[in-house]
Image (cartoon, grey):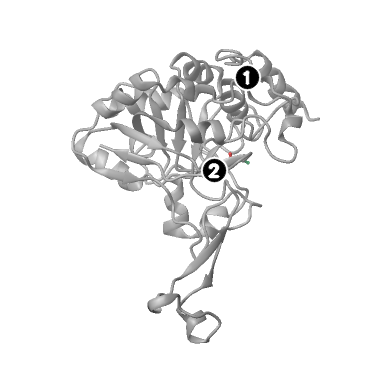
Amino acid sequence: MSANNISISQILKEAPKNWGRWGAEDELGAVNYLDQIQVLRGIASVQSGRVFTLGCPIARKEGDPVWPGRSQPGHHMTQDHGTYCCGKLQPLGAGLEYADDVIYMAVQGSTQFDALGHVWYDDQVYNGFDANTTIDGMEKCSIMPIAEHGVVGRGILLDVARFKGKKNLDKGEEITLEDLLATAKAQGVTIEKRDILLIRTGWLSVFYNQGSSAFYEGDFNEPGLTYTPELVQWFYDMEIPAFGTDTIANEQTVSCRTGTALPLHGALLRNLGVSFNEINWLEDLAEDCANDNQYTFLYAAAPLKIVQGTGAPVNPVVIK
Ligand code: UVW
């Protein structure tokens, strides 16, 4: 084990935890905060009825943005008009023919939610469940509790890239708590307790506008939130149930503070049970918010109910 690994493990031991807050058997985490009051608070922020969907297209021929090493989503037709033309299939009665297809993808292979059991440290996942519960399918902290509950409440866009005057943040650029608060201030919006945060880096637009080689070139190091004790304490105090970004992993890939990969997956997801909604298309929403200066809205997302899944694809909906 490297010195960094030892220190992050120590950091996580001392950092705030929500383990036990909703009982010893809880597998829902901070989404427990999203009660009916939060749904009504989200609905109360709707003004125009304009709808934005945040999911990315799945299985494009040019490829999709996925974490390095994960397979690309695949899609193929199992039957189409050609199947009938060549006589492999006969029409159903009255000439009815139909097309069918299948997809094959990593559950984290597109816009998705992570299950709370997706990561662990020191052999423990969220709420102290043993990491052995992940073997052969998530016995604890799968995506199911989140999928069944749904993630609905008041959302708030924090357009950090625009605040910093950039089309997109640079590779590996950190976002601090100060950046989040300064962005909200510049937007003239107040982050309230139990808000669902959408944090825009512009990074995903590099993939779609400049191509996958620009996105993956060199060491893979996305920009994003970085670990600091203040940031983690703030998420805890603000009772943030979930947050989404336009990056693959929702945080700076290698934290410039700890020197380790994805420490917020430990401090927020595993310790606090905060839900991670990753790989969101935020460009259209951000443009609209900049135009009408309305940065709060109803956010609603229901990941697919994948039994024992480590995560699930989702197409979140924002209503302004
Ligand atoms: C990893 O777990 C590596 O990333 P993600 O949270 O994006 O699935």
Q: Residues within 10 Å of mark 2 (few under 14, many from 20)?
A: many
Residue type at tag 1: Glu
Residue found at x 41% / y 35%: 199
Q: Is residue 268 left or right of residue 163?
A: right
Give whichever of discs 1 and 2 has the lower sequence position. 1
Alpha carbons under labels 1 and 2: distance apart: 22 Å
Closer to the camera in the image, 103 or 13: 103
The residue wearing badge 2 is: 312
Quarter of the figure with the C terminus: top left
Badge 1 density bin: few <14, some 14–19, many ≥20, Cα 10 Å: few
Look at the picture and state if 283 lies above or below 97.
above
Q: Is residue 197 at least partly visible in the picture?
A: yes
Measured as percent of width and height from the top left, residue 288 is found at 25, 43
Residue 248 in sight in this render: no
What residue do we see at 27% from left, 44% from top? 51
| SS for callout 2 | strand
Seen in the picture, residue 27 relative to 54 is either above or below; the reply is above
Name the quadrant where ligand 1 sits.
Answer: top right
Give the answer, above or below, for where 131 lies relative to 169.
above
Give residue 25's mark.
Answer: 1
Question: Considering the numbered disc 1 on the image, is that residue within a helix, a strand or a loop?
Answer: loop
Q: Where's residue 318, x and y in %?
A: 32, 39
Which quadrant of the figure has residue 5?
A: top right
Q: Residue at x 75, y 26 (%)?
A: 123
Residue 94 tag number: none
